[in-house]
Structures are given as C-alpha cells and as structure tokens.
Amino acid sequence: MKTTVKTICNFILIAVISCSNSERQGGITGSSANRDNQETEITYVPGMSLCKAASYPVGVAVSAEKLGDSRYAGVVRREFNSVTAENQMKMAYISVAPGKYDWERADAIVAYAEKNNTRVHGHALLWHESLPPWVENFEGTDEEFEAEIKTYIQAVVEHFKGKVASWDVVNEAIEEDGSWRNTVFLQHMGEDYVARCFRWAREADPGVLLFYNDFNLSSNPVKAQAAADMLKGFLPVDGVGMQMHIQVETPAISKIADAVNIFTEMGLIVHFSEIDTRLNADDKLTELTYEAALAQENRLGEIVDMYNTIPESQQYGITFWGLRDNESWLLSRYGTDWPLLFTETYEYKIAHRGVIRAFE
Ligand code: 9MR
C-alpha cells in the first residue's frame, strides 16, 4: 500500500515538473517530511528533480526502445537534461557494412532529445568491444582499414552534426598498466591512431566537443597518467570521460580527486560519463537493505560534492549508466546488485536524495 501511494506521488511530481529547460527552480515540499518519518526506507518521495537542482547537465544512458515507453520517458524527461545512447551509437549498431549505415535507433534518441531540449552525448565512435563483423575480421590492407575507419568516423560525426553536442571519440584504448590496449585499431593503424581519430572527427565537425573515455581512471593513477600523457600529445582534445563504474567504498574520494586534478590541470573538461555504484561486490546481499541503500546515498553525495569542486568551465556534467537497477549491465556481468537511482517500478531510491542534496 505504502509503495502504491509513493508511486502515485512520484507520478504527480513527474506530471508537474519536466526538465525541458535548464533553469534551476525551487523545490516542492515532501522530501524532508519523508526523510524524517521514514528513516529506514530505501525509497523516498523526491522534492526536486536532478536536472532542476544541478548547475551542470545530468544525464542517463538510454535506448530508443526504452524512450518509446511513456512511463520510462516521463522519468527521463523529468530528471535528466542529457542522454547518452547506452549502445545504439556504437559501431556494431550503426555500421552495417563499409559505407552502409543504420541510423534508425540513434536517430530516435536524437528525436527524443530535440523534442525535450535535452543534450545528446555521442558514445562512442571507436570501441574495440562493439564492432561489426567486417571490422573484426577485416581482410584488406592496413591502408584500406584506416581509410574505412576515417570514412566511418566522418560519416557518423557529419550525420549528427548540430544534433550531438559531444563524442567519445575513442573508448578504452589504454590497459591497466598504462600500455596501449592491443585492439584491432592498434594492430592496423599503429600507436598514434587515437590522435588521428580525433583529427578526423574534428575535421568533420569543428564545433562538436571531443572526449576520450575510459574506466578505472579514478582508481588507477598509472592509467590516468597514461591517458593524460596520450592526450597531451594531441591537444586540443576537449575533454575526458571518467566512466565511474565504482563501488560503494572504493576508490577513495581522495584518489578520485587526484585523478580529476590531472585532467583539470591540463585544461580538459571532465565528464563523469557512466556512473554506477556496486553495493554487492562481495555477493553477500540477496536484497537491498536500508544500510546498503544509505551507504549508496552517502557515496553518491560525496562523488557529487567532489565533482562540484571542478571549475565550472570544466564541468561537462555527470551521467548515470542507466535509470533503474534492473537494467544495469552490472547484473549480467557480476550478479545481484542495485547500482542506479531508481527501482524497477520507478520508485526513487534514497541514492537520488544523496545526489540532490549534494547539488543544493
Ligand atoms: O551498458 C552497456 C551494455 O548494455 C552493453 O552490452 C556493453 C557492450 O556493448 O556495453 C555496456 O556499456 C559499456 C560502455 O559502452 C563503455 N564502458 C563500459 C560499459 C559497461 O560495459
């Protein structure tokens, strides 16, 4: 019964506030009463939406199909003013064959964004884990491979020119020890392939922001420094996406701050581009306890507090890697967990409150 009442309340809030403009506005009463009365609940009734409370864009990873569901789209519209395609702008989805493209699902995401005044962050032009068969099993010469990659990058950037604000140009090119990851791109194009990809993307759209995106940049200083050194070689790159697939206790916030500083000191914009928080890495929980939910609320609060210290001109925003816990890639990879801000039934977890409080 309680759940039903809260769900209805959530929908009333969704109906009255959308995040289609970037102005911040005052809160709605409700959250503090709930906070006081229901201290052991893992969900709460929000008093404010994320994108209204934040001074920088707040994003979420989406798919065209999910945005086609009005309930899902309603929550995204209310809470977020930036979207990233979780998968549908990757090469495996767009590139059917050399010179042949399937834009349908990516275009549907852009259409949602245009209708709702939402920023689109493009993810990702090159990623070795999402390749069409023709790239994976390429049979031509290295020169032919490089020509096809250049054509692909420029076709995609041009297709979304003026519609996509930014691109992860290359995703995850560096190993944990700081060396180059041995991908099909490295094999055919050599070590300066990342720099060339940035140049081709820049040629195709001088106005779009270009990012390098990777995981464990906040937990592994060797990798963060290797990324910084790589990017120094071909400035101006605009920014770095620190994915932030983190756990509830690690990495320590000071470690994250050190990594952020490496990039901000270089003048780069920083995007926390794929935030999720694993609560159950040791696999001890079979359900989300209040203690774990509270730890997540506090953890996200400290992450956002840290992000807030970045100079405003270098804050690209923060993006959550999915909306509801049940959708997260982490579940199929690692097992039971609750990494995101919403429950399967769209209830607001107190993790959402942790983010909001840090914005206020
Ligand atoms: O969340 C994405 C999952 O649905 C896909 O199956 C997977 C492979 O394409 O990619 C996941 O997203 C990844 C992102 O694109 C890059 N950083 C790591 C993310 C988690 O694997």
Image (cartoon, grey):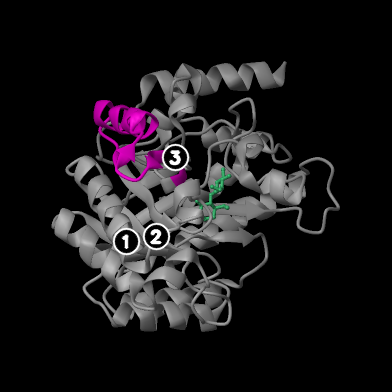
Q: Position of residue 157 (x, y in %)?
A: 24, 49
Mark positioned earlier in the residue sequence (2 or 3): 3
Q: Position of residue 154 (x, y in %)?
A: 23, 52
Examine the rendered structure and indicate whether residue 234 appears above or below residue 16: below
Q: Which residues are magenta?
A: 92-119
For residue 140, the mark is: 2
For residue 354, the mark is: none
Helix, strand or loop for disc 2: loop
For residue 144, the mark is: 1
Helix, strand or loop for disc 3: helix
The residue singled out by tag 3 in the image is 93
Report crowding for label 1: few under 14, some 14 to 19, many 20 or more residues within 10 A (C-alpha): few
Q: Give the alpha-carbon distance from disc 1 to disc 2, as whole Å.
A: 6 Å
Image marks 2 and 3: residues in contact by CB distance under 8 Å:
no
Q: Position of residue 285 (x, y in %)?
A: 83, 48
Left/right placement of residue 316 relative to residue 207 reads right
Q: Amino acid at mark 3?
A: Tyr
Quarter of the picture containing the N terminus is: top right
Of tags 3 and 1, the one toward the viewer is: 1
Can residue 19 be spotted in the picture? no
Mark positioned earlier in the residue sequence (3 or 1): 3
